[in-house]
Amino acid sequence: MTNAIRWLPVLVMIAAASSLAADPQPRPTKDKDAIKGTWRYGSVLDQGIERPMPPETRVVITSDMIQIVYPKDDPMGWKYTIDPSKDPKEMDWIVELDPGHPIRQPAIYKLKGDTLTIASAAAGKPRPTNFESKKGDFGGVWILKRAVEFKTPP
């Protein structure tokens, strides 16, 4: 028996043991990192009707916040969570208009390249199951495109 064959069972056990060692810190999901950034509205559908958004309006997503930045008004933001393991992928918005009384708004999302599509429902309504918007829905669909922000050199 060669040395390589003799050590094979030991190497397999070492590899198995090292794969079982769990990292106590949860690793960020690929989607959680990929959706971070600045987005512009491609379109917004509300009850089946496309609603115009000022072209300068941006959606800024950080690791735990979504913020709509308007050209002339104060920004509006809220916390969010995602679950990319679901089909469709789930997102929840946690809106707190009244401090200490958060409202959870269910949504779904899909991320394809530089396009992020979010379909949301109103608080208390069931989570959307598709990326459609029709009359009578209390939510909407955002189609966001990654914004390329140019900074002037110093």
Image (spheres, rainbow, N blue to C red):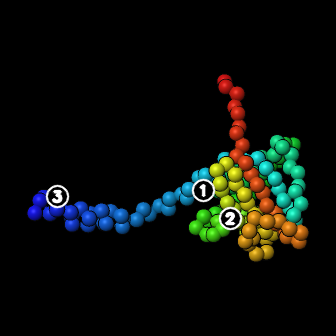
**Mark 1 falls on what kind of element?**
helix
Q: Which residue is mark 3?
A: 4
Query: What type is the residue that disc 3 sits on?
Result: Ala
Q: Which residue is mark 1?
A: 32
Residue 74 pos. (x, y %): 83, 47
Is any atom of residue 110 visible in this view? yes
Residue at 82% of width from left, 65% of height from top? 133
Residue 9 falls in image quadrant: bottom left
Dot 1 or dot 2, earlier in sequence: 1
The crowding category of the residue bearing disc 2, from other C-alpha atoms within 10 Å (few below 14, some 14 to 19, many at least 20), is many
**Mark 2 falls on what kind of element?**
strand
Residues under numbered marks 3 and 1 in contact, where contact means CB atoms less than 8 Å apart: no
Residue 21 pos. (x, y %): 36, 65
Query: What type is the residue that disc 1 sits on?
Result: Lys
The crowding category of the residue bearing disc 1, from other C-alpha atoms within 10 Å (few below 14, some 14 to 19, many at least 20), is some
Foreground label between 3 and 2: 3
Query: What type is the residue that disc 2 sits on?
Result: Met
Q: Residue furthest top?
A: 154
Relative to residue 8, is residue 39 drawn left or right? right
Dot 3 or dot 1, earlier in sequence: 3
Question: Residue 120 or 60: which is nearer the viewer?
Answer: 120
Q: How far is the residue under mark 3 from the one under mark 1?
A: 43 Å
Quadrant the N terminus occupies: bottom left
Q: How far is the residue under mark 1 from the one under mark 2?
A: 11 Å
Q: Which residue is mark 2?
A: 91
Residue 20 falls in image quadrant: bottom left
**Mark 3 falls on what kind of element?**
helix
Numbered-mark total: 3
Residue at 32% of width from left, 62% of height from top? 18
Foreground label between 3 and 1: 3
Residues under numbered marks 3 and 2 in contact, where contact means CB atoms less than 8 Å apart: no
